[in-house]
């Protein structure tokens, strides 16, 4: 731990010839006060520039959000031509896949479109829309999760930060949320610390500011899902321990066999000379 640098002692001391030098403490205080005032003025200028920069950055983001929108729409149309594009991207994502149960993966095969929409001023919040084809699990065509992160985008009841989720209209006997939360986790995937399943995450609105899964979808999966769809499916099969043990035993047997043959040869040689 670094120590705080000591201030120079200005109210007393001596010159090179030993003559005492006395600096009035009032002068030191005046100089420090003046310097502090100037530092405060500089800091105010920096804060004002930072605030202006934030406003300019938001304007640039708003501009490019509008420019990106046609590209996202075109991409969504092209994605429809690729079966299981979104569910494959979800499964291949290292973090998002951690909350997917096998039954949910089957359900997400009906996910035809993913859409992330930031609110007009960007910083106030965003929504994630999940578009589904007809499926045996629920009636909804679109499931939406919205995040209201400041007072400018307060939820309908005026709360912020807050998040809301579309109520899922489960078909009879197909409530995955109830089924998956009631059974022990047998999936070998590494589970997320806060959520057991995908629909558990979707329905949970307890901590909208620190929703890691939502941020991953918004900032990572949505901007470039292709990188996850194209992840090669490579499985490295672990070596069979029994095979290794058999190979080791065969190696030992070969060595023992070699030694035995050598001894027999030596005995034969001795017998020929004797």
Image: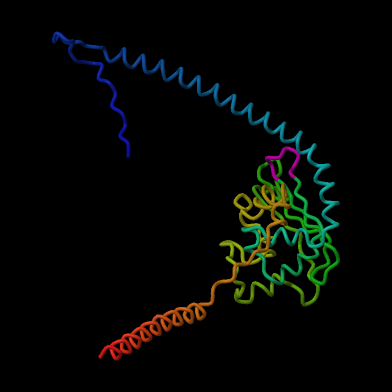
Left or right of 78? Residue 27 is left
Q: Position of residue 239 (x, y in %)?
A: 54, 73
Q: Position of residue 92 (x, y in %)?
A: 67, 60
| Residue at 55%, 72% in the rendered image | 238
- For the N terminus, the image quarter is top left
Give 76 or 56, whichever is nearer the viewer.
Answer: 76
Give 175 or 257, whichever is nearer the viewer.
Answer: 257
Q: Position of residue 126 (x, y in %)?
A: 72, 47
| Residue at 78%, 51% in the rendered image | 115
Q: Is residue 120 magenta?
A: yes
Give 49 or 103, whichever is nearer the viewer.
Answer: 103
Left or right of 255? Residue 78 is right
Magenta stretch bounds: 118-125
Q: Where 265 sits versus 97, above or below? A: below
Give 126 or 29, whichever is nearer the viewer.
Answer: 126
Q: Residue lying furthest front in this view? A: 273
Count of numbered circles on the image = 0
| Residue at 67%, 69% in the rendered image | 101
Provide the major secondary structure of the magenta segment.
loop
Q: Where 268 sits versus 124, above or below? A: below
């Amino acid at each position: 731990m670094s120590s705080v640098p000591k201030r120079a002692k200005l109210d007393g001391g001596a010159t090179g010839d030993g003559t005492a030098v006395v600096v009035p403490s009032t002068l030191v205080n005046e100089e420090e006060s003046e310097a502090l005032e100037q530092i405060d003025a500089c800091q105010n200028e920096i804060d004002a520039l930072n605030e202006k920069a934030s406003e300019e950055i938001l304007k640039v983001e708003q501009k490019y959000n509008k420019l990106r929108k046609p590209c996202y729409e075109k991409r969504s149309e092209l994605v429809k031509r690729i079966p299981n594009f979104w569910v494959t991207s979800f499964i291949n994502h290292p973090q998002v896949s951690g909350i997917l149960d096998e039954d949910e993966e089957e359900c997400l095969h009906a996910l035809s479109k993913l859409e992330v929409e930031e609110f007009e001023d960007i910083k106030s919040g965003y929504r994630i829309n999940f578009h589904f084809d007809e499926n045996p699990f629920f009636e909804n065509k679109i499931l939406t999760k919205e995040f209201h992160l400041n007072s400018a985008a307060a939820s309908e009841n005026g709360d912020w930060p807050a998040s809301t989720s579309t109520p899922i209209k489960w078909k009879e006997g197909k409530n995955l949320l109830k089924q998956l939360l009631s059974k022990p986790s047998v999936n070998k995937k590494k589970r997320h610390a806060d959520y057991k399943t995908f629909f558990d995450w979707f329905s949970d609105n307890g901590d909208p500011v620190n929703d890691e899964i939502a941020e991953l979808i918004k900032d990572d999966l949505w901007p470039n899902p292709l990188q996850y769809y194209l992840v090669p499916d490579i499985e490295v099969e672990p070596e069979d321990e029994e095979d290794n043990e058999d190979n080791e035993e065969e190696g030992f047997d070969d060595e023992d066999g070699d030694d035995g043959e050598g001894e027999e040869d030596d005995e034969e040689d001795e017998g020929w000379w004797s």
